[in-house]
Image (spheres, rainbow, N blue to C red):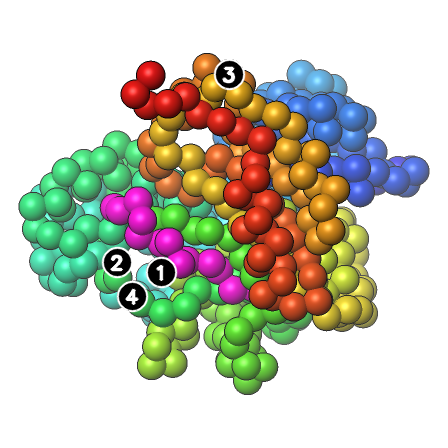
Amino acid sequence: MTDRLLVCGLGSGMDRSLSELRSPRTELVVATDTPGDRALEAADTLVLCDPYDTTAVLAALSAAGIDRLDGVFSLGADNPPVISAVAHRFGCPGLPLETALDCTLKDRRLEILRRAGLDVPRFATAASVEETVRAAEGIGLPVVLKPSDRTGSLGVMKVESPEEVPLRAAEALRISGGRIVVEEFLRGTEHTLAGFMVDGTLHRFGFADREYGRKEQFAPYFFEGGDTLPSRLTAEQIDEIGETVQRGARALGLDPAVINTDILRTHDGRVVLLEITCRITGARIATEVMRLATGVDPLPNLVRLALGRPLDLAELEPTRDRAAVQRFQPADGGVVEWVGDPRNVTRRAGVHDVFWGMELAPGTVVPPYRGGADVLAGVIAHADDVATAEAVAARTLRTLPLRFKDAAG
């Protein structure tokens, strides 16, 4: 009998990995609300639904005649509670629902980590503008506002003055389900660690530096410019971060699990856990960017984890040491006059891929930047060293086949 796998939710660009999941021994079911050509081609069964809504997913599976699943996971979609609930419904391996909620809801996650003695930002939760004002006063400005139940950087804002707090609090509360997290603003370098947690031990397969050189260009919103491998940190500093992530995963009960993290290392050496959750790192980072640098393909072990089978830890050992970067161009307003095919740029040496971050055509009105999802374009590049890879990426973004109308016209 073949293994029937459900990929429930696709993060940005992650549909490119679907073809690698196809196998004569596997039947692939894909649940998504944004079906593209890659999903249509790779899926044995394509289910149209909101992958962040458990009820919608179960109803769509039933309508498609899916009465058996052997494993469930997402590709970069931050929906662990849905994955847990669907896995439980079909008797598949998976984490308990409460564990999935603990690592997804920001306020619950921070409280658990704090109680376990992990270093997290000072924070408070708020359900109204008035509570947000009091929380900001107690923590001290500047603070960061984060919708508790939203993924990525949606609705995340830095607030620096007392006059801003009510306006930004109202905005964050509209985006959230009614609760927001108010965090102290910390400075330092940010990093992504990707790994698998098995029997109390973290097995790291990727570590990247987050590119935040233009972080506050679009204040109050943050802009993340991409990711870089290898890291600028020393091996000892990376190991220290790995130990901290392992403690965090244990505190949250993420075992066995695939681990995605956002870590901040302050200038005085504090290792602060900003995020830790049980999904594979999205935006093509774990599946392509890290893989270009290290040679490690995490997908076979992701499938084994979903099926409840032992991981092949030898596959997580690096087989090469190269530089790889992903860089984004933010979308920040304008009307498209002409757009070409970015794939024409990929023929250049060192360019793995160039892509649009949104649908573009002549006449498309690009909105002002409001957060991490507002990416105009991106490039993945690789080379023998970071400086060369960064130069290839920068040159590629400067020559995108795109022209905007003259604002005066």
Quadrant of the image occupied by residue 259: bottom right
Mark 4 packing: few (<14 Cα in 10 Å), some, or many (20+)?
A: some
Which quadrant does the C terminus fall into? top left
From which residue to which does the magenta span run?
207-220
Three-letter amino acid code of the residue under disc 4:
Leu
Residue topped by disc 2 = 183
Task: Look at the numbered disc 4 and give the secondary structure of its residue.
Answer: loop
Give the residue at x 60% y 66%: 386
Three-letter amino acid code of the residue under disc 3:
Pro
Give the residue at x 26% y 58%: 183
Task: Look at the numbered disc 3 and give the secondary structure of its residue.
Answer: loop
Measure how far apart labels 2 and 1 are at the Cα level.
10 Å
Q: Position of residue 112 (x, y in %)?
A: 38, 63
Return the disc, 1 or 4, that comes first in the chain's sequence.
1
Mark whose residue sits in front, 1 or 4: 4
Mark 2 vs 1: CB contact within 8 A: yes
Give the residue at x 48% y 35%: 376
Residue topped by disc 4 = 186
Return the disc, 3 or 4, that comes first in the chain's sequence.
4
Return the disc, 2 or 1, that comes first in the chain's sequence.
1
Mark whose residue sits in front, 3 or 4: 3
Task: Look at the numbered disc 1 and give the secondary structure of its residue.
Answer: helix
Mark 1 packing: few (<14 Cα in 10 Å), some, or many (20+)?
A: many
Q: Is residue 49 visible?
A: yes
Mark 3 packing: few (<14 Cα in 10 Å), some, or many (20+)?
A: some
